[in-house]
Image: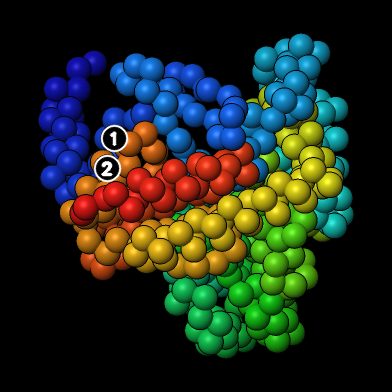
């Protein structure tokens, strides 16, 4: 059946995105990786760029574990033993012993009773929040939470929804006060690390407010934290925002296997009855294939590396590189939002200059992510850089030299 009347509508929408500057555009295609050598980290080849090598400063692989020999070997061994894919959803015949072992390792790593793995962190968030929401639930969210949380709130059908100002614990308290006595259950959800800016939620204060109001909700005030950018990359031992803030465990913690752990997939961890409930009610768990057995084996190896002396050394190195870059930005006159997380935003605060600096860096062989108006408000235009533990001090200094040479 032809789509002769629909296609022009779709094309008009695409034209609007192009005109507004919000279209993602053509994707860079990685064609090869040049291993780290001679005091510099890995470099990447892109389609259409010949032999030109790029320093990747926009990767979520914060510890560089995606290129770690032991992680690669674990994935290869898992694939040889079990095959390339799981072949079914979990409740039919897609659960392998490596999935169960990974979940046990994750629960132990986080000090929880149980955990369950999903195909992605996005699927984890949506399939955790939506089943926990009833018609007598109020759902309360930070205004800068990730798109996965925003869409979970859109899909859920609570009694009420509330958005509090970014990290504004006072507004969170007001929202809980407003719904106490009417809603039976409150779910407070926040990112641990806010990925665009690299700042973190004040989890200790948020948890305290949740405890303060808990008795006023018959089915509790439940704190859900998506710490996908924190787990593995934040805190002295990589336990994320909970460790850094000293908040104690959130009721429900979501993490990812696709960022600091360097593999693929997402997970949720918490009380054993909670996890059993989610296995019975989470649509993207029940009706979607899990990560492959090879990925599960690789992810478990990555968690074990983080939870070791090698992991602590990688985290210390990552913190040192982050400080080096932030201090260097001050010397070259580029504003940032300082903090210990390896997301380091360069606050350019002008759309034209943001685009120009992204192009300057690309031409010099550096990959970054620019966020300009209207994607962000005027005055908040930035370039997000992400430090990885497989970068070197020479890489950071090379990037700073390129920035110092910019005449924008």
Relative to 366, is 271 on the left or the right? right
Q: Please say if the residues under marks 1 and 2 sit with CB atoms less than 8 Å apart.
A: yes
Residue 376 position in % (x across, y down): 30, 60
Relative to 249, is 61 on the left or the right? left
89 over 277 or under it: above or below: above
Say which residue appears at 75% left-offset and 48% top-offset: 313
Relative to 191, is 332 on the left or the right? left
135 over 35 or under it: above or below: below
Q: CA distance from mark 1 to mark 2?
A: 5 Å
Say which residue appears at 26% left-offset and 50% top-offset: 406
- Numbered mark located on residue 360 in the image: 2
Q: Nearer the viewer, residue 306 or 21?
A: 306
Relative to 124, is 330 on the left or the right? left
Q: Residues within 10 Å of mark 2 (few under 14, many from 20)?
A: some
Residue 300 position in % (x across, y down): 78, 35
Residue 124 position in % (x across, y down): 62, 46
26 over 19 or under it: above or below: above
Q: Secondary structure at mark 1?
A: helix
Q: Residues within 10 Å of mark 1 (few under 14, many from 20)?
A: few
Say which residue appears at 69% left-offset and 72% top-offset: 245
The image quadrant where one finds the N terminus is top left
Q: Kindly indicate the quadrant of the structure image that contains residue 118.
A: top right
317 over 42 or under it: above or below: below
- Numbered mark located on residue 363 in the image: 1
Q: Nearer the viewer, residue 408 or 289?
A: 408
Q: Nearer the viewer, residue 385 or 323?
A: 323
The image quadrant where one finds the C terminus is bottom left
Say which residue appears at 82% left-offset and 40% top-offset: 304
Residue 85 position in % (x across, y down): 67, 18
């Amino acid at each position: 059946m032809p789509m002769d009347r629909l296609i022009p509508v779709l094309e008009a929408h695409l034209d609007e995105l192009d005109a507004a500057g919000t279209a993602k555009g053509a994707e860079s295609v990685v064609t090869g990786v040049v291993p780290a050598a001679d005091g510099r980290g890995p470099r990447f080849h892109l389609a259409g760029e010949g032999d030109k090598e790029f320093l990747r400063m926009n990767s979520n692989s914060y510890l560089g574990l995606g290129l770690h020999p032991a992680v690669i070997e674990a994935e290869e061994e898992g694939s040889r033993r079990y095959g390339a894919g799981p072949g079914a959803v979990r409740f039919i015949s897609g659960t392998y012993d490596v999935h169960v072992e990974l979940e046990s390792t994750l629960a132990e790593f986080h000090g929880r009773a149980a955990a369950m793995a999903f195909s992605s962190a996005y699927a984890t968030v949506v399939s955790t929040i939506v089943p926990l929401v009833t018609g007598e639930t109020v759902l309360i969210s930070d205004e800068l939470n990730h798109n996965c949380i925003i869409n979970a709130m859109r899909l859920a059908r609570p009694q009420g929804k509330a958005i509090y100002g970014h990290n504004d614990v006072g507004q969170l308290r007001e929202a809980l006060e407003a719904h106490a006595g009417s809603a039976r259950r409150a779910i407070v959800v926040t990112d641990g690390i806010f990925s665009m800016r690299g700042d973190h939620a004040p989890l200790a204060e948020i948890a305290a407010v949740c405890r303060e109001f808990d008795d006023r909700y018959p089915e509790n005030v439940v704190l859900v934290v998506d710490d996908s950018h924190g787990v593995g990359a934040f805190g002295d031992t990589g336990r994320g925002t909970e460790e850094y803030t000293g908040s104690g465990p959130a009721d429900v913690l979501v993490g990812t296997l696709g960022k600091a752990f360097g593999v693929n997939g997402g997970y949720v961890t918490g009380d054993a009855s909670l996890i059993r409930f989610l296995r019975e009610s989470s649509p993207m768990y029940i009706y979607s294939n899990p990560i492959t057995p090879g990925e599960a084996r690789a992810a478990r190896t990555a968690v074990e590396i983080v939870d070791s002396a090698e992991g602590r050394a990688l985290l210390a190195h990552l913190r040192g590189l982050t400080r080096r870059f932030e201090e260097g930005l001050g010397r070259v006159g580029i504003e940032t939002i300082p903090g210990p997380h390896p997301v380091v935003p360069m606050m350019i605060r002008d759309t034209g200059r943001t685009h120009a600096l992204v192009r300057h860096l690309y031409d010099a062989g550096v990959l970054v992510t620019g966020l300009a108006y209207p994607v962000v408000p005027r005055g908040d235009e930035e370039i997000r850089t992400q430090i990885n533990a497989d970068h070197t001090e020479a890489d950071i200094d090379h990037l700073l030299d390129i920035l110092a040479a910019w005449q924008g």
